[in-house]
Amino acid sequence: MRRIKKVRILLIPLVTVSKTSFSRLLNYKLKYVKNIRHYKTNNSHAQDTIFALSTAQGKAGIAIIRISGPNASQALREMVSLKKNFPIPRKATGRLIVHPITGEMLDHGLVLWFPGPNSYTGEDIAEFHIHGGTSVVRGVLDALGSIEGFRHAECGEFTHRAFDNDKLDLTEVEGIADLLNAETEAQRRLALRQAQGGLKHLYDTWRQQLIENMAFVEAVIDFGEDENIEDGVLNQVNERIKHLVSIIQNHMNDNRRGEILRDGIHVTIMGPPNVGKSSFLNYLAQRQAAIVSPIPGTTRDIIEISLNIGGYPIIIGDTAGLRKSDDIIEMEGITRAKNMYELLIYSYLII
């Protein structure tokens, strides 16, 4: 836990006060701002040097292995031929990559060096851009693991360290996760705005307004009898807080638009047996996703397909026909269909 070091204080008060009281109000603003602290996670492994494959698993033309931590430069000194100068920061350099213990050549690739704090994690970072063959990647990872103090990164640990080192806030971290999972254009645009700090700037604005109003309330409490405090200050603060609360409520009551866009719009197709539910699903999918038969009760489980319609992810489910049946399996399918209908926001009933 540490205090925020840099805070911009507005020099123009939100209410009319005399010059005599202005300095007092600024002091209160500073007091409130300095007492607002960042939440930091307690990570006992923060001093470890971590490494991981940063590109997808499997065969590929190129694989990127990232190393981050206080001893990241050690990987370059022990695994890269440094007969020439140490790599220039942020400039790709072609080098031989060798095993730190045996000296065996592992690959010839590109090496990049990002000294902290000007890196993704805020720590020293080294990257090996190597050939993406399975054995090459495994060989380099095993070699890194043989260096004392180095360990495999946990899932999401690079971004975790970026958050701990004030490189990202929680909204930006969430935006990055959404960007990695984006499958449609609409998802990509939304995630990119958030990853670039769209929500952060909005929330920081609200936070600054709250700090300003807290300062004025505290000033009135301490100097309420001072003739330099203008009348009606609390009324003005009250009106601004009401307006801010209204804005925040509108932001929260967005009918889960962001969540729906991120997770997809779920739609169920329901109705009696043999009315064309499965045929409709196949038409939308442009393939034979569900079995179509004149025999009632063919569909017994929920069959889902994912579509990209206008950049929006749509998950459509075909369900068992609604009817009474002595078949235990069919009745289980009907029960599941009804349960899904109750959970979803959008459903189409075909009769």
Image (spheres, rainbow, N blue to C red):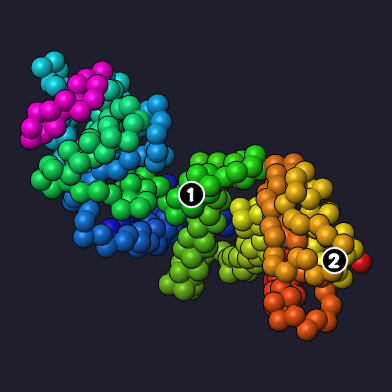
184 vs 31: above or below: above
Name the quarter where the N terminus is drawn.
bottom left
Look at 75% across and 80% down and name the residue there.
Answer: 327
Mark 1 closeness class: few <14, some 14–19, many ≥20 residues within 10 Å: some
In front here: 317 or 49?
317
Q: Main secondary structure of the magenta part?
A: strand
CB within 8 Å, label 1 to label 2: no
Q: How far from the left and from the top, in percent, is residue 36?
A: 37, 61
Badge 2 is on which residue?
295
Amino acid type at circle 1 is: Ala
In front here: 31 or 264?
264
The answer to whether residue 225 is left or right of residue 41 is: right
Badge 1 is on which residue?
177
The answer to whether residue 232 is left or right of residue 9 is: right
In front here: 98 or 293?
293
Q: How far from the left and from the top, in percent, is residue 226?
A: 47, 69
- Residue numbers of the magenta segment: 94-108
Look at 26% across and 18% down and name the residue there.
Answer: 94
Q: How far from the left and from the top, in percent, is residue 256?
A: 66, 61
In front: label 1 or label 2: 2
Amino acid type at circle 2 is: Ile
Q: CA distance from mark 1 to mark 2?
A: 45 Å
State which quadrant residue 343 falls in: bottom right
